[in-house]
């Protein structure tokens, strides 16, 4: 009987959200722009035994390792993962940890995290969580080029979300990148569980690397004054492996690329831990080993949509020069529920030594699309459209990559925008300009 009231309360909240989703709003929603009505929400229940693993997902966790995360309703389930290269034959076992959290009247299941490895690249592994339940499988990323990323932000859990995930799954890729706004739970904790079940068929097979958005904050004055309790508990990323003290920002290397996930909703000024970590992280990048640098964050630094104007400006002013000096290739953002691709920029001007900026907050969220763009069109904005969809980043080799945006069109995904990229790591002219800043670089000297 002790769990009856919390369960009933969660059920009431869930039903309320399903039938009246329009009453829940983002903590930073801007009411000054119109939205296209979204498709209905998709609530995914758990129909198995309490001991069965659910909401299973994997993430990269340092060199040659994968973190397997899942939830059980049973409190005493084992935090173990059995794995091997043949289905049903597990010749390795790893043990991890588990914990739960409380949010108002909600009590989570046991959240398990187990790190497995070392693993071989481009290899399929079969695994089982907790010593029972279904078998899953994943393929590790390659050790070198080519590599392909699926990129999408502001995912949510609507019929549009399901369509986006199906379109992504229709073509092979290696790693899934999500620049914030995952479940759109906004405090309604059963929606975190539903989201985990919705994405499980995809997140069990390829690593999902995410960063937080405004919908992950979930603060309640006095009761829960500190944000990201649910996000940090459920979606543990390799921050410790990358020298970060916070799960809200981290980096990782994969197949010749260095990926940096920044936190738009934690401190970022020059005196902050995030700024100092980013400065050190960029200084340690070896462009001969990882010639490509990609950055993901939530609130865009450049944006010609009327939605969320200026919300990333403080962070841009604080950190843009760090990315410019490091010759970052692309910056991906979410938050604005539309797609937009900019040219290479630095300090609000076209600069061929700056990053290309892409807004990809069009995964399928329940709030709908941000339909209105500012006019006249900025010369920095090369393509913009308010449609749901996803992106593909195919890094072919050390010098060239291909970016494409795929618009959701019901039964299929249509390539609506694409561009070829050349890595800034090979631009002699760009590295020579760093002499003006008094910087030295072994790569610059070689060029």
Image (tube, rainbow, N blue to C red):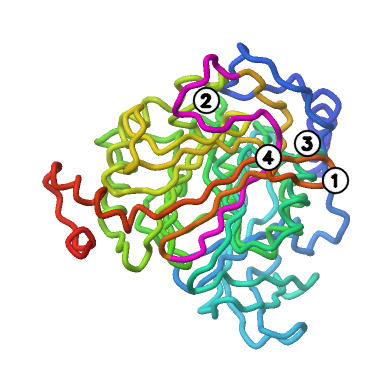
Per the image, the residue denoted by label 1 is 411
Q: Which quadrant of the rendered structure holds the N terminus? A: top right
Do callouts 3 and 4 mark residues in contact (Cβ within 8 Å)?
Answer: no
- Quote the CA–CA distance across marks 3 and 4: 26 Å
Per the image, the residue denoted by label 3 is 10
In the rendered image, residue 136, in percent from the top left (x then y), is placed at 74, 70
Q: What residue is rendered at 51% in x and 51% in y? A: 420
Dot 1 crowding, Cα within 10 Å, few <14, some 14–19, many 20+? few
- Quote the CA–CA distance across marks 1 and 2: 47 Å
Side (left or right) of 85 relative to 54: left
In the rendered image, residue 58, in percent from the top left (x then y), is placed at 62, 62
**In front: mark 1 or mark 2?**
1
Side (left or right) of 191 relative to 374: right
The residue range painted magenta reads 373-397
Q: What residue is rendered at 62% in x and 24% in y? A: 26
Q: Residue furthest left?
A: 438
- Nearer-the-camera pick, 146 or 153: 146
Whether residue 64 is situated above or below residue 97 in the rendered picture: below
Kindly tell me whether residue 95 is visible in this rendering.
Answer: yes
In the rendered structure, which disc, 3 or 2, sits on the residue that comes first in sequence? 3
Q: Which quadrant of the rendered structure holds the C terminus? A: bottom left
- Nearer-the-camera pick, 414 or 204: 414
């Amino acid at each position: 009987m002790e769990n009856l009231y919390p369960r009933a309360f969660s059920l009431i909240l869930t039903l309320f959200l399903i039938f009246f989703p329009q009453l829940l709003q983002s903590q930073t929603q801007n009411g000054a722009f119109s939205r296209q009505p979204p498709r209905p929400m998709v609530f995914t229940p758990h129909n198995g035994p309490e001991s069965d693993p659910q909401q299973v997902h994997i993430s990269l966790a340092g060199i040659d390792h994968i973190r397997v995360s899942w939830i059980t309703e049973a409190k005493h389930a084992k935090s173990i993962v059995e794995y091997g290269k043949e289905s049903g034959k597990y010749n390795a076992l790893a043990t991890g940890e588990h914990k739960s959290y409380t949010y108002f009247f909600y009590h989570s299941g046991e959240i398990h995290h187990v790190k497995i490895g070392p693993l071989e690249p481009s290899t399929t592994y079969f695994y089982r969580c907790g010593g029972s339940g279904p078998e899953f499988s994943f393929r590790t990323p390659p050790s070198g080029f080519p590599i392909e990323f699926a990129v999408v932000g502001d995912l949510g859990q609507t019929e549009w979300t399901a369509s986006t995930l199906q379109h992504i799954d229709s073509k092979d890729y290696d790693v899934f990148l999500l620049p914030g706004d995952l479940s759109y739970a906004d405090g309604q904790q059963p929606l975190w569980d539903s989201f985990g079940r919705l994405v499980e068929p995809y997140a069990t097979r390829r690593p999902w690397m995410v960063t937080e958005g405004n919908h992950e904050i979930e603060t309640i004055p006095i009761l829960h004054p500190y944000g990201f309790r649910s996000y940090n508990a459920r979606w543990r990323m390799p921050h410790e492996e990358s020298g970060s003290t916070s799960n809200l920002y981290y980096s990782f290397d994969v197949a010749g690329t260095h990926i940096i996930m920044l936190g738009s909703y934690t401190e970022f000024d020059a005196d902050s831990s995030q700024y100092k970590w980013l400065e050190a992280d960029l200084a340690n990048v070896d462009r001969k080993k990882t010639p490509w640098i990609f950055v993901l964050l939530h609130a865009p630094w450049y944006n010609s949509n009327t939605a969320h104007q200026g919300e990333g400006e403080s962070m841009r002013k604080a950190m843009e020069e760090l990315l410019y000096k490091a010759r970052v290739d692309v910056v991906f953002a979410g938050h604005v529920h539309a797609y937009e691709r900019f040219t290479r920029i630095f300090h609000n001007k076209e600069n061929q030594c700056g990053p290309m900026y892409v807004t990809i907050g069009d995964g399928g969220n329940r709030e709908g699309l941000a339909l209105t763009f500012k006019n006249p069109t900025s010369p920095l904005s090369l393509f913009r459209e308010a449609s749901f969809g996803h992106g593909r980043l195919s890094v072919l080799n050390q010098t060239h990559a291909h970016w494409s945006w795929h618009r959701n069109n019901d039964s299929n995904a249509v390539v609506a925008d694409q561009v070829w990229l050349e890595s800034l790591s090979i631009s002699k002219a760009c590295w020579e300009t760093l002499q003006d800043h008094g910087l030295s670089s072994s790569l610059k000297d070689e060029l």
